[in-house]
Amino acid sequence: SSSNNNNNNTRIITTEPTIIHFNNAGASPSPPVVVRAVARHMAHEVIMGGYLAARRARTDLDNVYSSVARLINAQCHSSSCFGGEAESSSPQVAARREIALVESATVGWTRIFYSMVRNLAVRAERDAVLAASNSNEEATGTTAEAKTQLLVILMSEAEYAANVVAAVKFAREQNDMTARTGVRWKVLSIPSSTYTDGEGRSHSTGIVDLDALDDMLSGRFRIDDGNDGQDRLDPESIAMVCVTHIPTNSGIINPVEEIGSRIAAFNDRWQVDDDYPALPRCFYLVDACQSAGQINIDVHTMKCHALAATGRKFIRGPRGTGFLYVRGDVADELVPTQVDHSAAPVERVPRSEGGDRDDRSSAYTCSYDLTGNGRQVGLEFCYQPGAAAFEFWESNVANKLGLGAAIDYALDSVGMQHIEKECCRLGDVLRSRLRSMDGITVYHDNADGTTRQCGIVVFTVDGVESRKVEEAMIESSDDSPRQFEVSVVPATSTPVDSANTLAGDMVRASVSYSNTLEEIELFVKKLHEVILTKPLRPYTHT
C-alpha cells in the first residue's frame, strides 16, 4: 500500500512488515511523520539547492532546539540562567543557549568531555605552578620538590566503551606530561551495588552503589596506592563524575537524580574557584543515549552540567543525529577544544601593521604571524555564546528536521508518560517470559522486582554463540516466517561491567512502545524453535 502527502508532493511507500523490530536500543524504525520531514527537505534541496533550502528552513530548524529542550526540560525561563537575557528572548533563542545539535551521542559526549577536562587541567596546572613557587620561596633559596596534584575522573561501571576509552586516553596522555605539568590523572569506576541470590552468591546489579559514591565524596573510600597497599581517596581530587543513565548491555536504570544531588552538595561544600565563578569544582556528565525517548528526562532534577543523547534509538529519529545539553552558565564559560569558523567566528580580517591592505603585492609577499607575536596583527575570533560553541557549520539539515519531527511526535502525539510506561511494561513481560525458558540466562535480571528496569533485555542461550542466535532470529522459513531484528552486545561495549561479571557477548532484545504483547509471544516462540531445531555452533569462551 502507499500513502501520499499532498502538501509536499513526497510519496512514502509502505508494505506489510515482515521484520519485527526488537532492536530499538540500536536504531528504531522512524514513524512516517519523520520520513516525510526528511524527504520534504531533501526535495527542497533538489529544487533550490542546499544553502537556500537551509535558509528557508531556518525557523523550523530553530524549533528543533526548542523540541529537544522540551524533551529533557532544558528550557530556561528564569532571568538568572542567562544573565537576565532569558525573559526577553524567544524560546528558540533560550534553547540554543543550552542545546547543540550533533551527529551522535558520542560526538556530543566527547566534545563536552574534552572541554571539561581541559578546563580542569588548566586550573590544576596553574595551581601546581603556584604551589611550586610557594615551595621554592619557603625553601629559602633551595629548590623544593612540589607535590604532584591528583585529579580523579569517576565513571559508572556500566559506562559505554567509547566514554571509557576517551577518559583513559586523556589520562594516559596527560600523565606522560606530569613532570612538566605537576598534575596526575586517575580514572576510577564507581562500584555497583550487589545482591545475594538464593544460594548465597553475590552478584553485581550494574547499578551505581550510592553508598560507595558517598564514601568516595566524603573521603572514606580506599583505593590501591600502586605499592600493594591502599590509600584513602582524597575527595578534593575528584574533578568529574560520568554516569551512563541506561547502559547498552542491560535494562538497569542508574539513579542519576540521586547522584546529581550528591554532586551538587559536594560542590557546595568546596569553595568555587574565583577565576571560574560559574564553573563547579566537580563536573557531572550524563550519557542519555539509551534513555532519551524511552523514559522521562529532566536535566534540572538530575542537576547535571551536561548530557548527551542520540536521535536514532528510542526517539525514533534518523541516524546521524543527536544532541548535547550544556547548562547555560557552564556553556558560557567552557572553551571548546575543537572548533571551526562557525563555533568561533573570525571577527575581522588580519591587517598588516606596516602597509596598506589595498596593496595586493604586499599581501602576497609577506607572512602573517597569526598569533600576533610578530610584525603582523594576530587572528581575532570569538566563541559563540552557550552551547552553539560545540556545533560545527556543516550538518545534515534534513536529518535535523527529522529529529525535531521525531521528538514532537513522541511528546505531542504519543506522550512520554505513555512511552515510559509501555517500554518498562513490555520489557518486564519479555524478561519474565525469557526467565521461564530453559537454557536462557537474563543478564542483570531483576527477578524480585525491587528495582525498575526498562525495555532493554539482554540474555544468553546456554552453549550457543550469541551471534548465531542473532542470525537465526532474522532468518525466515516456511515453518517460521516471522523475522526478528535483535543485536549482539559485545562484552567490550561495557568493559568494566563485563570484567566484574565475567559476561561474554550477549543477545540484546530491546522493545519500545511501538511493540506489542503479541510480538513478544511470537518472539519467544521463535526463540524456542531456534534453540530446539537450529544446528547452532556451540559457543567457545576465549
Image (cartoon, grey):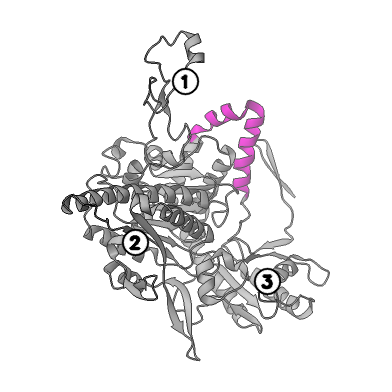
- The amino acid type found where label 3 is placed reads Ser
Q: Is residue 78 visible?
A: yes
Q: Label for residue 140?
A: none
User: What residue lies at 27% left-to-right and 45% top-to-bottom?
Assistant: 276
Within-10-Å neighbours for mark 3: few <14, some 14–19, many 20+: many
The magenta span reads: 32-59
Secondary structure at badge 3 equals helix
The image shows residue 537 at horizontal and vertical percentages of 76, 75
Instruction: Read off the residue under disc 3.
Output: 466
- The amino acid type found where label 2 is placed reads Gly
**For marks 3 and 1 on the same chain, the one whose residue lies earlier in the sequence:** 1
Query: Rounded to the nearest whole Å, what is the CA distance between mark 2 and mark 3?
Result: 36 Å
Q: Nearer the viewer, residue 379 or 522?
A: 379
Q: For the residues carrying marks 2 and 1, which lies nearer the camera in this image?
A: 1
Instruction: Read off the residue under disc 2.
Output: 260
Instruction: Read off the residue under disc 1.
Output: 367
